């Protein structure tokens, strides 16, 4: 299994940061999201400029720990893309990718946000690209919250 962890520090309280990301269906801070619809514990995300729907199942949420995790359960549409001159098809990643976020207080007005990703063995050729996407997301969250 491959695992990547990305993090950033945000000049806001941990409670403020948690409030911004706790709603599994609110992805206004995540870049390139066109729509996000939640039914039960599954959110379906569409990306701007792509014919791609991504289903993610919320598997755990802990308000005391300020954390949640989810599992990629389905991909529909155009699952093929190019990165660094190579073509990839990510359709096979369904059921093999877990991710989550954690917010920790560093002091009363500063929080550390960690976004982690685990990919089952044999499916880890996309882990670095996904980690770059998650880092861009939390960097965008930082800009969103710090104004």
Image (cartoon, helix red, strand yellow):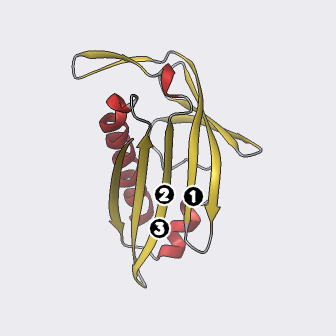
Do the numbered discs 3 and 2 sit on residues whose CB atoms are within 8 Å? yes
Q: Which residue is mark 2?
A: 101
Q: 123 or 9: nearer the eye?
A: 123
Q: Examine the rendering and report whether any part of residue 25 can be seen.
A: no
Q: Which residue is mark 3?
A: 103
- The secondary element bearing badge 1 is classed as strand
* x, y percent for residue 124: 36, 33
Identify the mark at residue 18; answer none if there is no mark: none
- The secondary element bearing badge 3 is classed as strand
**Residue sitting at x 54%, y 75%:** 15
The CA distance from mark 3 to mark 2 is: 7 Å
Q: Is residue 72 above or below residue 65?
A: above
Question: If you read the primary sequence from the N terminus, does the residue marked by circle 1 or circle 2 appear first?
Answer: 1
Within 10 Å of the Cα at label 3, are there few (<14), some (14-19), or many (20+) other Cα atoms?
Answer: many
Q: Which residue is mark 1?
A: 68
Q: Is residue 145 above or below residue 30?
A: below
Q: 9 or 140: nearer the eye?
A: 9
């Amino acid at each position: 299994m491959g695992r990547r962890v990305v993090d950033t520090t945000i000049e806001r309280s941990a409670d403020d940061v948690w409030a911004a990301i706790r709603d599994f269906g609110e992805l206004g801070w995540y870049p390139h999201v066109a729509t996000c619809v939640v039914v039960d514990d599954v959110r379906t995300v569409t990306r701007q400029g792509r014919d791609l729907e991504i289903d993610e199942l919320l598997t755990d949420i802990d308000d005391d720990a300020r954390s949640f995790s989810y599992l990629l359960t389905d991909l529909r549409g155009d699952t093929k893309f190019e990165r660094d001159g190579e073509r990839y098809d990510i359709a096979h990643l369904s059921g093999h990718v877990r991710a989550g976020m954690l917010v920790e207080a560093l002091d009363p007005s500063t929080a550390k946000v960690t976004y982690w990703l685990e990919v089952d063995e044999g499916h880890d050729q996309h882990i670095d690209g996904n980690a770059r996407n998650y880092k861009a997301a939390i960097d965008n969250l930082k800009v969103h919250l710090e104004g």
